[in-house]
Image (spheres, rainbow, N blue to C red):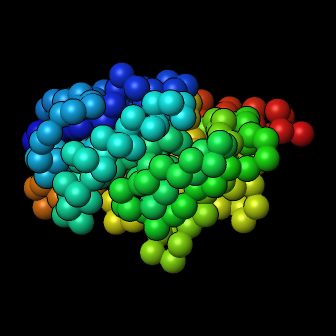
Amino acid sequence: MHLRICHLYPDLMNLYGDGGNVLAVLQRCRWRGIETDVSGVSLGDVLDFRRFDIIFMGGGQDSEQRAVAADLQMKKGESIRETVEDGAVVLTICGGYQLFGQSYTTAEGEELPGIGVFDARTFPGKGRLTGNVVVESLTGDNDGTLVGFENHGGRTYLGPDTEPIGRVLIGGGNNGEDGLEGGRYLNAYGTYLHGSLLPKNPRFADRLIEAALTRRYGSMELTPLDDMLEHIAHKAAVRRAGQTRR
């Protein structure tokens, strides 16, 4: 078995260890004997994204997001949307999540167009939502919780065609108001959880790998791994989040 992974803008969108999500997927595939290759794709690159099984994009500052938003509109957005409709797996973090929505309005009032994978719009808020986050997962992962770290000034609001990843137990989530975190459409996920997300949430990582393999090879069930240490770390992160948010 073999998976092709696209890392979008690794030189521009890689805040708070977001690139570690790619490393986590590679290692969990390696432990199972699944071959992988990773293609870094950045400004000006033109290609057919349907060749990829997993597409990843991290977060960045507004200056990087301006350049990336323009590049997505000119070069890549339509192909990415077609790939999502074809069932490919997508994981976008923070700024990537915002630009995969309908639009992102900066703190200066500049509206950057998104590519519309998610039915979501992001607006500037007062202050930043920062700190450790615990989310009650709506995807059935990690004994009901996902953990991560958020640091964002944008407030994201979901439309009816995108469902949340989970409900916030600790932290701000999408907007600090409606108690929701992240967005999901088909096999595409967007979230504000940095940290890196996938090493802290191994079952969610496996969900993405399994979905990518199923798309390529048909119905697939992954060989279980010994994740005792990962689950201990996950539970410790939940406890720490509760202590730091008090």
Reply above or below: 199 against 143. Answer: above
Residue at position x 21%, y 33% in the image = 44
Reply above or below: 142 against 64. Answer: below
- State how many labels appear: 0
Residue at position x 68%, y 32% in the image = 236
Residue furthest toward the right? Answer: 246
| Quadrant showing the N terminus | top left
Whether residue 30 sits left or right of residue 100 in the image: it is left
Whether residue 197 sits left or right of residue 109 in the image: it is left
| Closer to the camera in the image, 158 or 20 | 158
Whether residue 206 sits left or right of residue 124 in the image: it is left
Task: Locate residue 86: give its quadrant.
Answer: bottom left
| Closer to the camera in the image, 171 or 130 | 130
What is the x, y in percent for residue 165?
A: 53, 59
Residue 105 visible: yes
Whether residue 42 sits left or right of residue 237 in the image: it is left
Task: Locate residue 129: give its quadrant.
Answer: top right
| Closer to the camera in the image, 185 or 80 | 80
| Quadrant showing the C terminus | top right
What is the x, y in percent for residue 28?
A: 31, 33
What is the x, y in percent for residue 71?
A: 30, 40
Residue at position x 83%, y 39% in the image = 245
What is the x, y in percent for residue 3?
A: 16, 40
Residue at position x 39%, y 35% in the image = 67
Residue 168 visible: no
